[in-house]
Image (cartoon, rainbow, N blue to C red):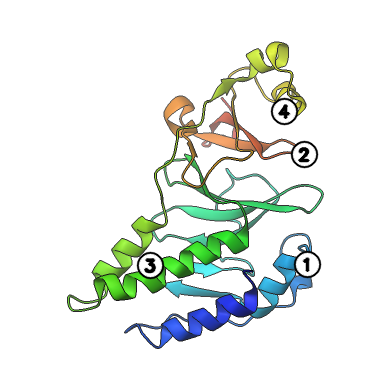
Amino acid sequence: MITGHSLATRLRSLAARVPFDLAVLPGLDTTALPAPVPPPAERELLHHLGGFSVPPVEVRLTGHPRQESNPALPDLRQVVSDDGGGGVTWVDIAPDGTWGQVLMQYREGGLYVQGPSLAAWLDRLVTTAEDLVDEIGFEDGVQPYTDEFWDALRPDGPQLPLHPAPSLRTDSTDPALAALARHVPDNALLADLRDAAPGSRARFDRACGPHRLRRAADAPVFAAVPWDWQHDRPR
């Protein structure tokens, strides 16, 4: 079972094997999070582990400094990492407080599934870092390690289909898709991330350009609403 205690222990062990500071951060009182108090499993994880860094990746499980820097994201979120190049990773938190998938938005605006849960994503992240210590070493400095580390966290997966909102209003029998389609403009595109494997991606950026994300009320279904950011309004 993946726990905050086991992950924190593994990170401290890893810190002794790498020639840079992992900066393992202590946990935090979860009532201070800029999001609803998490369920018991996530609460235990955050109690033991507040974050860490493997340059250039910085993970802050108790609220990242870029929490408010990306207005394109859904309003309810817990940003947990920043890849140093404009990509932001966050936990998808439903309006009822359920903590779900870990998602990433590319700098360009595509939506990418990192993992089914915060614990699963962190386990893969720490395992990757542990494995690379033995595979790569540091004979050529730190950069080869950090490059491989970040690349390994983006497994290739399928392109998720994008659905025009008008077609879902009339043809979809799925309540979550149909309900969200009724609340977005005709030029919006929708993607269903339910049960999407890590590496799955919805390339909204390629299909509609600059956009703002909207989330369905009761499922990880997202709509990209084309957005005029200069005037902060739909296009």
| Most distant residue in the top direction | 170
Which residue is painted at 73% across and 60% down in the image?
Answer: 35
Which residue is painted at 65% across and 21% down in the image?
Answer: 185
Instruction: State which tag comes first along the sequence, 1 or 4.
Output: 1
Read off the residue under disc 4.
Answer: 180
| Most distant residue in the front direction | 1
- Say few, some or many: other residues with alpha carbon within 10 Å of mark 2 (under 14 / 14 to 19 / 20 or more): some
Q: Is residue 25 above or below residue 220?
A: below
Q: Quadrant of residue 46?
A: bottom right
Q: Is residue 177 above or below residue 108?
A: above
Read off the residue under disc 2.
Answer: 218
Residue 40, numbered label: 1
Instruction: State which tag comes first along the sequence, 2 or 1.
Output: 1
Instruction: State which tag comes first along the sequence, 2 or 3.
Output: 3
Discs 2/1, front: 1
Q: Quadrant of residue 50?
A: bottom right
Q: Which quadrant of the figure contains the N terminus?
A: bottom right
Compared across the picture, whether 146 is left or right of 228 comes to left
Callout 1–callout 4 Cβ contact below 8 Å: no
Residue 177 x/y as whole percent: 70, 26
Residue at mark 1 to residue at mark 4: CA–CA distance? 29 Å
Secondary element under disc 2, as helix, strand or loop, is: loop
